[in-house]
Amino acid sequence: MPLQTPNPARSITDRQTARHLAPIRSVLRRSGLLVATALLVACGGGGGGGGDGGGSIPPVVDPLIIKGRYVTDPNVAPAYTVLVVPAAGGGSDQAWAVSTSGDTLIRLSLTSSLAVTGQRYKLTDPIGRESIMGTAVLEGTASSASLRLPGLIAVSSATTLLTRTDRLTDAAVQATVAGAWTGQFDAGARTLTWTVASGGQLTGNSNTGCTYTGSLVARTDASVFDVSFDQTCPTVPTPTTLRFSGVARPSSASSLTVVAVSADEVVPWVGLMQK
C-alpha cells in the first residue's frame, strides 16, 4: 500500500499489491472473519475458556487482561472482529482488525497505559493508508472486559465498543498447522501454496512465480500463531522481496486465516489458507 515516497521499486510493489488485494473481500467471507489483529485473522472458533478472576481493571493493564477476540455490536457500522494479543517477546499489545465488508485492515499497538498508535489500510486501494492515534478504554472486570478502540471508524479519535467473545487463553498447538496449505486469490487466477514443517518452517510458491520462505510458530501465551515470511516476486528489472509479519489463527483443522503487514508497515497481507 502506498505512501508518498518517490521510490520506483515502491510503485512496482503497489501494482503487485493491488493485484494481491483484489480478492480479499471474498476471502474474508469464506474465512469466517465476517464481523482483525487483522488476521484478520480474527476468525471465530478455537481459543479457550479459563479465568483470571474478576476484579477491577487496573490503570496499568497487564497484557493478559486485555488479550482476546472482540467483536463490535451487531448494530454498529462498520463492523469488525478484533484480535488483541501480547506482543511476542514483550512490548506493546497488538490488535488486528478486519471490517465485515472486507475492505479495511487495521493494525494497532497498545501500551500498558492503553495509548494506541497504528495504521488503517484500505484493502481495495493500494495507496489508501492513514495513521491512527488515541487511547483505548477497558470497561467491566478482568474476566469480562469490554474494550473501546480508536480508529475503527472514520474519525480516528472516536472509540468503538467491542465485546470479548474469546479470551484466547489456550496455547496454540504447532502440529495443527503442519502440512500443505493452499490459497486462491484474484478470483482464482492466482494460487498460493505453503508447506509448513513440524517445526514451523514455511516455504511456498505461487503460480505467478512468487516464492515464500518464513515461519509459522505457535504462541504459548495465546491461541494464535506468529507468522513471518519473505515474499519474492518476479518484477522487472529485478525481483521484489517484501518481508511480512503478523498473526494467524485456525478457524478449523483445515482453514487458516493470516493477517500481516510488511516490515515498513506499508503493505497489508490478508489471506485464507486451506488444507
Image (spheres, rainbow, N blue to C red):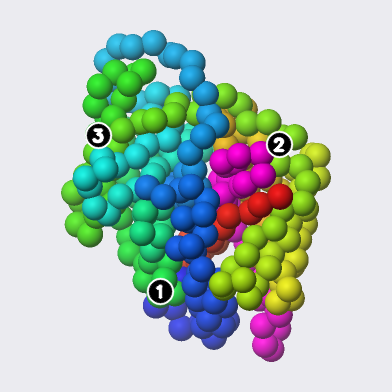
- Spatial separation of the CA atoms under disc 1 and disc 3: 30 Å
Residue 51 appears in the figure: yes
- Spatial separation of the CA atoms under disc 2 and disc 1: 34 Å
| Stretch of the chain drawn in magenta | 232-259
104 or 242: nearer the eye?
104
When asked about the image quadrant of residue 252, the answer is top right
**Front disc: 3 or 2:** 2
Which residue has dot 2 on it?
176
Which residue has dot 3 on it?
137
Mark 3 lies on a secondary structure that is: strand
Q: Is residue 124 above or below residue 147?
A: below
Question: Which residue sits at x=25%, y=22%?
Answer: 140
Near mark 1 (Cα within 10 A), the count class, few <14, some 14-19 or many ≥20, is: some
The extreme bottom residue here reads: 237
Does the segment drawn in magenta span residue 217?
A: no
The three-letter code of the residue at mark 2 reads Thr
The numbered mark at residue 125 is 1
Mark 1 lies on a secondary structure that is: loop
The three-letter code of the residue at mark 3 reads Val
**Front disc: 1 or 3:** 1
